[in-house]
Amino acid sequence: MYYLQIVQGNYYHLLAEGNRVATRALLPSRGELCDRHGVPFAQNTTTFRLVFLMDKRDKVEKTLEALSKLIVFSDEEKEEALKSTRKKRGLDAVILKENLTWAEVSTIELHGADLPGISVEVGGVRTYPEKSVGAHVLGYVAAPSEEEQEGDEALAIPGMKVGKNGLEKHFEKRLRGVPGYSAFEVNARRKVVRELDQKPSAPGQTIRLTLDGNLQAYVQETLEAHPSAAAVVMDLRNGDILALASTPSFDPNLFPQGISHKEWNKLRDNVYVPLTNKALSGRYPPGSTIKPLVALAALHAGVINANTTVHCPGYMYVGTHKFHCICKEGHGPVNVSQALARSCDVFFYEVGKKVGIDRLAAVYQDFGLGSGGLPDFPYQKRGLVPTKAWKQEKKGEKWTVSDTVQASIGQGYMLATPLELAIVIARLVGGTRLMPRLEGIHGMLFPQMDYKREHLDLVLGGMGDAANMLGGTAFRWRILDPGYEMGGKTGTSQVRRITRQQRALGQTRTYHLPWKYREHGLFMAYAPVHDPRYVVAVLIEHAGSSGPAVQVARDILLEAQLMEKEAEL
């Protein structure tokens, strides 16, 4: 007795308390994701859910049988419930059904005496009030997988949902909150006697994003006129991403309570890949949108100046290979401003050769190409800036002059994401190492880039002419409203090579081809030209030309400026 009570007394006391007291984890409320004005993009909606309390597990089959006679409770749901109760340990409840209607709640409460272990609890379900607007950047939540639950007890709490991609996953630790608990006194058979204590859970943080809900919705709607497209809008003052959209989109409300196989297969098998965030992870040849950087690299290296001209006959030879210009008749003699406005390929072929791939690649990388753009953001991909070392390592081949020529017009091995192109235009316009952000309320100061302001202004002048001077590649789709004008650079990227036979027949355009063989259309732009505030990068997959991308960018930049003016009134 002395040994049991005195020597080992504390030990057996703890064992007894462990048998007498059981705890049940309480689900925390997930934090909200809001736009820059505090309007929720992702929030929690109060719902009723049906749970089975595990202290009545010996009566589960009888209870489920009685339940199926009162509400719609399928055999599949019944089988899943039985499986869950067999796996579950302790006093954690098993969720049998979520989103109960008020009629179902009333019926269950009325027949409570005949349903041992059944309880109706007030819960919350993650909802996205704007549905498909911003779905790609926000992501969605769903039940954690068994792999995710390993090593994290909080994820085993009934009803727990975790971010599966996008910002829901990126901010998971901040959004999840901290679980609370209820402590119960139980008897020897683990039946609940009474509740002893309760510690409420701590809700997750509310996170305010840089996105503008109204502009995001406008961009999404504008892009939906095209089968597959993406756009990024940024504020030059602070790097705020105001809109980031990809189309087709999807409804993230399908996922929190478990998406059906039918809906999942519909999304997975869609040829336009609605689950892919093309703005961040779509990699495309940048085409002629790269030309402002080629011009700047040449000016910076002293290879050309404002008065340097190149004669364009409509083609250029490298060895026996003929490289064509966008204008098959040729542009004649053009300087750098004219070459940018008219997108003369021959000018940039010649200039790119003189600059060389090493200096070109250094400038490309300096302006954000190949960086991805958002550090540590999930599902983001980086573009590709090829170099001599890269080709030797990946292809086992030496770099050639033809490779440099193609890299000078954004083709060949080059790849970029729409976000990276938005960074390019932002750094060109601002002359600073601007970094984009999706969260933050304080102003940002960015270091100056090591390029002369006169060189940057010369490049921007050519981009301004592209949209506002007769003969410019974007002139026909320019902003007509005085004071709101834009500047920019068009681009098309080939998805397959044009053969000699096709050129001989005049089949250089791709409108007549099936959708997947048409050129991508790109446009990166800024506005207003006299005092830039906004930048945008637009990609229209397989548009056949840059025209559709210019029109989308024009509408977006005009809308952003009008929204700003309206907010000032």
Image (cartoon, rainbow, N blue to C red):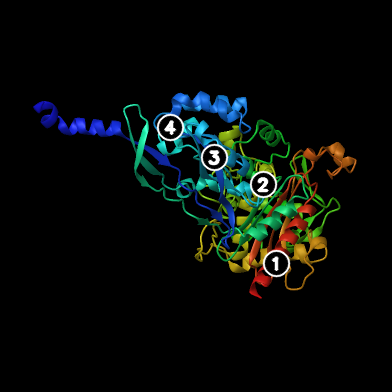
Which residue is identified by label 2? 407
| Distance Cα–Cα, label 4 vs label 1 | 58 Å
Q: Residue at x 62, y 69 (%)?
A: 454
- Residue type, numbered disc 4: Glu
Which residue is identified by label 4? 150
Residue 109 image offset from top left, x and y in percent: 54, 39
Q: Residues within 10 Å of mark 3 (few under 14, many from 20)?
A: some
Badge 3 or badge 1: first in the primary sequence = 3
| Distance Cα–Cα, label 4 vs label 2 | 47 Å
Q: Nearer the viewer, residue 410 or 357?
A: 410
Which residue is identified by label 1? 461
Which residue is identified by label 3? 109
Badge 3 or badge 2: first in the primary sequence = 3
| Distance Cα–Cα, label 3 vs label 1 | 73 Å
Q: Are marks 2 and 1 in contact (CB under 8 Å)?
A: no
- Residue type, numbered disc 3: Glu
Q: Nearer the viewer, mark 2 or mark 1?
A: 1
